[in-house]
Image: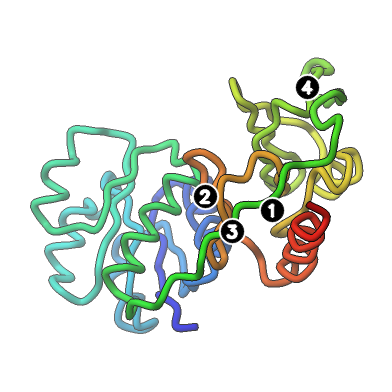
Amino acid sequence: MKKLRCLAVDDKPLALDILSDYIQKIDFLELAGSTTSALEALKLVDQEKVDLLFLDIQMPELTGIQVMKILGNKCHVILTTAYTEYALEGYEHNVIDYLLKPIAFDRFYRAAQKAQQLLLPASEPAPAVTPAAAPENTGQGIIFVKTEYKLVKIRLDDILYVEGLQNYVSIYTKTERILSLRNIKKMEEQLPRPQFVRVHKSYIVPLDKIDSIERNRIFIGEAVIPLGDTYRENFMQIIEDLQTAQ
């Protein structure tokens, strides 16, 4: 599969780490490099043959807008910023998308899809698969997870998906996002199978919340979850077994 070579540029190290992590989670993107310096970014675009630049607007040496003017048509750009007032100016420079911080992964993924559709050859989409309902009694259980200050009770039926973030996880429910002080492996062990399935090194999903599956993507409401190559075979076998059991 052809990939888009990406460069992440942000003068804030934490924001840069998030961008780099997001890029590496998407199989049609490749992280060519990352930098906190706008001047270094100008060099890396040429050295690393960058296709797509994730570019912060407010930086000390040069603004993102100035970087785009210098680069001209050397690569395509997705802007990132904490300030909405720059959106119009960004679009005047034909950026692919404009991401407002803090950037959720599903929003980042949609921006990456825009770049994929624009820059990579179109391919025939795989037919969507609607998985069977989860086993009986799904959602009758509860779990307790440790947050920074307390134990929080979560109904299994409320969980939309779980995202691993190094040494803690984000649990997305129907009403809120809960940060738990554990890694995704421990979370996987706590959740019942086959109701919950690991589909990526960073994601666990409940089968009954999946709306559709298309190639390497799982759709749950507005969220787009990547399906990792390592987990694909096991996941698709579970789906096939559920269909056969109907």
Of labels 1 and 4, the one closer to you = 4
Q: Earlier in the sequence, mark 3 or mark 2?
A: 3
Q: Earlier in the sequence, mark 1 or mark 4?
A: 4
- From mark 1 to mark 4, how far is it between C-alphas? 20 Å
Residue at point 67% right, 44% down?
163
Q: Earlier in the sequence, mark 4 or mark 2?
A: 4
SS at badge 3? loop
- From mark 4 to mark 2, how far is it between C-alphas? 22 Å
- Residue 202's tag is 1
Residue at point 14% right, 50% down?
91
Q: As shown in the figure, which amino acid type bears the numbered disc 2? A: Val
SS at badge 4? strand
Which residue is disc 2 drawn over? 224
Q: Does residue 240 appear left or right of residue 117 in this picture?
A: right
Of labels 3 and 4, the one closer to you = 3
Q: Does residue 151 appear left or right of residue 160 in this picture?
A: right
Q: Are marks 1 and 3 in contact (CB under 8 Å)?
A: no
Residue 150: percent from left, percent from top: 81, 15
SS at badge 2? strand
Residue at point 83% right, 40% down?
135
Q: Are marks 4 and 2 in contact (CB under 8 Å)?
A: no
Q: Earlier in the sequence, mark 2 or mark 1?
A: 1
- From mark 1 to mark 3, how far is it between C-alphas? 22 Å
- Residue 154's tag is 4
Q: Are marks 1 and 4 in contact (CB under 8 Å)?
A: no
Q: As shown in the figure, which amino acid type bears the numbered disc 4? A: Ile
Q: As shown in the figure, which amino acid type bears the numbered disc 3? A: Val
